[in-house]
Image (cartoon, rainbow, N blue to C red):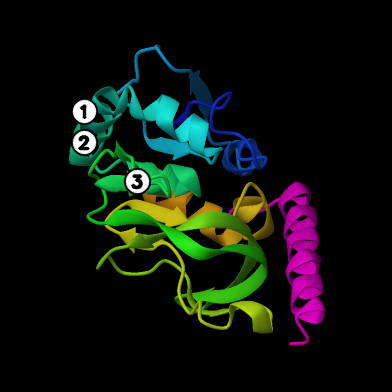
Amino acid sequence: MHIVHLFPETLGLFGDSGNVLALRKRCEWRGIDVRVTAVERGESIPSNADVYVIGSGSSNSVRLVGENIDEVRDALTNALTRDASILAVGAGLHLMSDRIDWSDGSSTTGAGIVSGVSVPRPTRLVGEFVGCVADLSVAGFVNTGHRLETDAPAHIRNVVFDDSHDEVQNDGVEFGTIIGTHSHGSYLPMNPAIADSIIARTTGQSLVKESAHIERADRAAQASRDAIRKRLGL
């Protein structure tokens, strides 16, 4: 399995390399051949990889990546024709949209992979949450000043923050082979079933082979999700 990590130096503000690490290690622990290619700004983006991961960053980082958005669009559009997977987190998700609007009235053109527009939130959304992906319980942490206005199906539903963010009910997008979320670098390590779904879809394997490493990682992830639920009073 070939993973491309897009712009880790520019879009890695919230430990987004953790998502790539989770995918890589869960492949290695199962004996699945895996390699990771990190692509920085100005470098050519392979269009023949299996999984593309793009993380989050500051508004300035988003504008910098936006300067090369045509190359991002072309590479990912070609990759999607081969059913490659995309995991876009935080600002990475907003860069997948048609446009990012800023509070100063300016805009940054997105890749147009996800139909919609990213707009500033009235108040910043910061905090831990729990929610559901299909029949899975997931948890994470969000820190974003934007929301994505889109008709695409949500990735996480039944979202619960603390009382200060009770207007948020869904998060991110999921359609085809694209997953987008605002949950930051701990998302796949904390929710390894999502990582396994990406691996299974990419490799065509049922992932029945387990290991002591996977069992330990899964127990730690469950403990982290349980701790968030407890802090939220659930």
Which residue bears the numbered disc 3?
A: 105
Q: Are marks 2 and 1 in contact (CB under 8 Å)?
A: yes
| 216 lies left or right of 13 | right
Which residue bears the numbered disc 1?
A: 74
Q: Is residue 203 above or below residue 143?
A: above
The stretch in magenta equals 206-234
Q: Amino acid at mark 1?
A: Asp
What residue lies at 49% left-to-right and 21% top-to-bottom?
37
What percent of the width, then of the height, locates residue 123?
Answer: 56, 65
What residue lies at 41% left-to-right and 44% top-to-bottom?
104
Give the alpha-carbon distance from disc 1 to disc 3, as whole Å: 27 Å
Residue 43 seen from this side: yes
- Please identify the quadrant where the C terminus is shown: bottom right
Q: Amino acid at mark 3?
A: Gly
What is the secondary structure assignment of the residue under circle 1?
Answer: helix
Which residue bears the numbered disc 2?
A: 77
Is residue 211 one of those drawn in magenta?
A: yes
Give the alpha-carbon distance from disc 2 to disc 1, as whole Å: 5 Å
Q: Amino acid at mark 2?
A: Thr
What is the secondary structure assignment of the residue under circle 2?
Answer: helix
